[in-house]
Image (cartoon, rainbow, N blue to C red):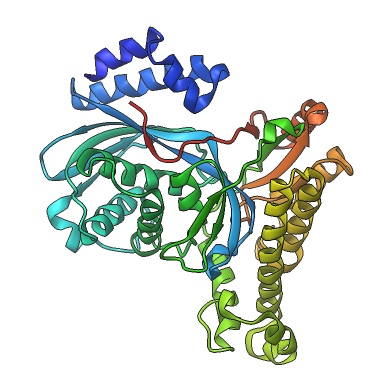
């Protein structure tokens, strides 16, 4: 169907059932308008074409903070905020992507992938990295034009970059490979694009959660083939909602802070002749702490302690959810948050003491929730967002309290999305 015909059909409600399956009935008016606008903008850029619409969700890390890059365990969920793309093949040997809110169109020539400069932090690098990895692994690639729009807020800790990478991989799978690419493989390729082409040493959790979808547990013992299992728990039945507060902090100039966490954990592992902490015996680590303090420094030791404790907590939280013990899950969530704050030390940046938005949000959450619910830093940390499970009867008070400090719309109420990267239409 052409972009204009599809736009009219969506506005007429012909795709309501499909959209409701992704976003819920309450969001239909908003999503109709959003999809229609994207289709209209595509037409302005690329004229009338036969199109498809693809989507990739953001994600929320539930537990396992900063463990994936050392082959640890996490719990994560895809959320009902996503990036969508209106796409058409162009047969011209290039990929052209225009994103709402950005002046430039990202263009990557397929014939020049081998000449692409790596390590440049921009969306064009992510596109080139996905194309290069999929091509190197023997998958078909081709030229396409796309217009994207996202409500996964950049810098929000909901993984806008991972959603974009997964979107590109899902498009290539759908257009040129019959939709055959495994979601976990797309995640692995997306991590490669971000590590090698974008230059950010991230783990694999963000991409896996965005690509697979749903509420999942992931074990990265073998990062080439992470073990992904769905967790059968309905948060809607527990009387709480998941809220993420955007504190407004910028992730600019924080790459070194993020990179230091896996590097310091790996420096501890190296003392035992291992590459990652997952390969180190915890008992041997505990016995060696006096010597490790001299070799790696105290912060590296504390971050390693966080890794071992957090890995056990993930197992305990997963067991609590699967057995319906939500109270234990919340208690463990609080322990995870305190560990991130005190041991992993990713709540604020020591070199920027005036900017401690996440620490302030955590303090406010404690005042607003008291001994109910649970809260912790969300995602990479240092700036961006914090997360809370808020009792329904406190939601209004919690939301207004947070937004009185961090601004209207800063508190997002999220739902778990079942679908990962997908061809919607």
Residue farthest toward the top in the current orientation of the protein? 12
Q: Is residue 283 above or below residue 353?
A: below
Say which quadrant the N terminus sits in: top left
Q: Position of residue 170 (x, y in %)?
A: 33, 42
* Observer able to see residue 105: no
* Observer able to see residue 6: yes
Residue at image coords 67%, 58%: 314
Q: Is residue 209 above or below residue 90?
A: below
- In the figure, is residue 369 to the left or right of 39? right
Q: Position of residue 338 (x, y in %)?
A: 78, 59
Tell me how many marks there are.
0
Using the image as rendered, state which of residue 356 and residue 172 is in the foreground.
172
Say which quadrant the C terminus sits in: top left
- In the figure, is residue 319 to the left or right of 176? right
Using the image as rendered, state which of residue 223 and residue 405 is in the foreground.
223
- In the figure, is residue 233 to the left or right of 57? right
Using the image as rendered, state which of residue 328 and residue 50 is in the foreground.
328
Q: Quadrant of residue 263?
A: bottom right
Q: Is residue 1 above or below residue 99?
A: above
Q: Quadrant of residue 51?
A: top left
Residue at image coords 31%, 21%: 39
Q: Position of residue 213 (x, y in %)?
A: 49, 42
């Amino acid at each position: 169907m052409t972009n204009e015909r599809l736009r009219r059909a969506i506005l007429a409600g012909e795709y309501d059932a499909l959209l409701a399956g992704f976003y819920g009935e309450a969001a239909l008016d908003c999503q109709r308008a959003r999809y229609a606008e994207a289709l209209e903008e595509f037409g302005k850029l690329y004229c009338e074409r036969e199109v498809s619409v693809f989507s990739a969700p953001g994600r929320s890390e539930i537990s396992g903070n900063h463990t994936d890059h050392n082959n640890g365990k996490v719990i994560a969920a895809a959320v009902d905020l996503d990036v969508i793309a209106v796409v058409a093949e162009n047969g011209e040997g290039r990929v052209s992507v225009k994103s709402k809110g950005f002046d430039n169109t990202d263009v990557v020539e397929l014939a020049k992938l081998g000449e692409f400069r790596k390590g440049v932090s921009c969306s064009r690098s992510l596109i080139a990295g996905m194309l290069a990895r999929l091509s190197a692994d023997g998958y078909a690639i081709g030229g396409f034009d796309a217009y994207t729009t996202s409500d996964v807020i950049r810098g929000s800790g909901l993984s806008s970059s991972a959603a974009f990478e997964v979107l590109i991989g899902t498009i290539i799978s759908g257009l040129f490979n019959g939709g055959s690419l495994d979601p976990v493989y797309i995640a692995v390729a997306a991590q490669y694009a971000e590590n090698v082409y974008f230059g950010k040493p991230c783990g694999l959790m963000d991409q896996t959660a965005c690509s697979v979808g749903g509420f999942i547990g992931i074990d990265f013992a073998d990062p080439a083939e992470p073990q992904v299992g769905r967790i059968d728990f309905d948060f809607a039945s527990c009387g709480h909602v998941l809220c993420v507060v955007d504190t407004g902090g910028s992730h600019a100039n924080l790459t070194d802070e993020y990179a230091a966490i896996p590097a310091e954990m790996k420096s501890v592992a190296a003392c035992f002749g291992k590459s990652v902490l997952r390969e180190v015996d915890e008992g041997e680590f505990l016995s060696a702490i006096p010597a490790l303090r001299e070799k790696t420094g105290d912060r590296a030791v504390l971050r390693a302690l966080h890794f071992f404790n957090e890995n056990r907590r993930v197992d305990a939280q997963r067991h609590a959810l699967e057995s319906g013990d939500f109270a234990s899950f919340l208690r463990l969530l609080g322990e995870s948050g305190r560990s991130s704050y005190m041991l992993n030390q990713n709540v604020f940046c020591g070199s920027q003491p005036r900017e401690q938005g996440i620490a302030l949000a955590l303090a406010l959450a404690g005042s607003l929730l008291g001994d109910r619910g649970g809260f912790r830093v969300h995602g990479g940390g240092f700036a961006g967002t914090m997360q809370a499970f808020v009792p329904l009867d406190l939601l209004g008070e919690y939301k207004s309290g947070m937004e009185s400090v961090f601004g209207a719309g800063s508190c997002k109420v999220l739902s778990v999305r079942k679908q990962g990267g997908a061809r919607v239409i």
